[in-house]
């Protein structure tokens, strides 16, 4: 196991969601399509469901949406979105 960087922020596992519900993707899946390296998708855009919940109070509840390709062709975690909570059945 690697040692964390001194300035790194560790988030609890409960703040990570690796996917979205089918209902959310059916209704608002287009909101979760973000720029991505062409090595991952030739269109340069892909749907990202995994997200880090930075906050859960108020109407903003910021999120970071990402695609974990750390063991794939790019060897990176690609961040597609950082901002307010996207639409779902609780926010619509």
Image (spheres, rainbow, N blue to C red):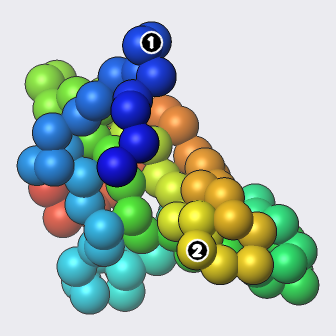
Residue identified by numbered label 2: 71
Against 83, residue 9 (above or below) is above
Q: Quick check: 40 left or right of 5? A: right
* Residue 68, horizontal then vertical, whole percent: 52, 65
How far is mark 2 from mark 1, CA to CA? 24 Å
Please tell me whether mark 1 sits on a helix, a strand or a loop: loop
Query: Is residue 45 visible in the rendered structure shown here?
Result: no
Mark linked to residue 7: 1
Quarter of the image with the C terminus in it: bottom left
Q: Quick check: 92 left or right of 51? A: left
Mark linked to residue 61: none
Quarter of the rendering containing residue 54: top left
Q: Residues within 10 Å of mark 1 (few under 14, many from 20)?
A: few
Q: Residue at x 39, y 64 (%)?
A: 50
Q: Residue at x 46, y 76 (%)?
A: 29
Against 75, residue 61 (above or below) is above
Nearer the observer, 25 or 63: 63
Nearer the observer, 84 or 2: 2
């Amino acid at each position: 196991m690697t040692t964390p960087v001194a300035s790194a922020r560790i988030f609890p596992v409960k703040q990570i969601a690796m996917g979205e519900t089918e209902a959310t993707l059916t209704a608002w899946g287009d909101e979760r399509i973000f720029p991505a390296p062409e090595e991952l998708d030739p269109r340069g855009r892909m749907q990202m469901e995994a997200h880090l919940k930075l906050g859960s109070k108020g109407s903003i509840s910021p999120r970071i949406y990402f695609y974990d390709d750390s063991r794939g062709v790019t060897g990176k975690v690609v961040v597609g979105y950082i901002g307010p909570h996207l639409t779902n059945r609780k926010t619509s």
